[in-house]
Amino acid sequence: MYTRNIERPSRTKNVFKFSSLKMSRIIAVESSLEFLACFHFEYSPDVLSFKSQPKGFYYKCHNKKLPYTPDFQIKRKSNNKASFVEIKPKVKASHPEFIEKFVLRIEKSESLGKDLILLTERVLSAEPYISNLKLFHRYAGFHEFNDIDITLLKTINKHRSIIAIT
């Protein structure tokens, strides 16, 4: 297993930073889709914790040992288990080469005792849910949630929308 460090400056990669109250720190991610995933993880009642770029692993493909680092590791309340999460645009996720490698990564991940979940922009960008989470995040600030915040989050998660922001 190994760990990638994405917080170093790079000329070729943008680094997005998400301020997480749940994790009490800034989460650095490599893409706008990963940034959207942070909103879902931050405000999901089922996600107890999340971490970007967790320790990776090696898996075999065509008799080669290939490295893999998941985009996130989350710990869920529903099964009290850590899971890896891969974030990909649907176009890339439907490519045959990606699918072949992803199946092998799932098998290796399961041998390590963790699920590997794939999320695409269809889930991460669903409107008006994502806009409501962004709006809530903007005004919530970096403080503990009060009763109003908790009620609002429960309503957003229950109905997956409150307002339509265009």
Image (tube, grey):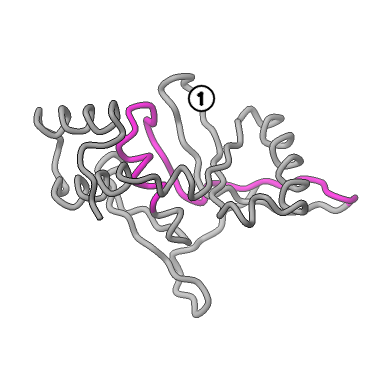
Q: Is residue 71 left or right of residue 150?
A: right
Find residue 76 and report its image quarter: top left
Q: Which residue is mark 1?
A: 81
In the rendering, at what x and y percent does residue 141 appear? 14, 49
Residue located at (24% from left, 46% from top): 164
Residue located at (48% from left, 19% from top): 79
Residue located at (48% from left, 46% from top): 122
Amino acid carrying label 1: it is Lys
For the residue pair 129 and 71, the one nearer the viewer reads as 129
Compared to residue 146, the image places residue 56 above or below, namely below
Does 62 lie within the magenta span? yes
Residue that extends furthest to the bottom in the rendered view of this protein: 11
Circle 1 residues within 10 Å: few <14, some 14–19, many ≥20: few
In the rendering, at what x and y percent does residue 119 appear? 53, 43
Residue that extends furthest to the right in the rendered view of this protein: 63
In the rendering, at what x and y percent does residue 55 appear? 57, 47
Q: Which residues are magenta?
A: 36-63
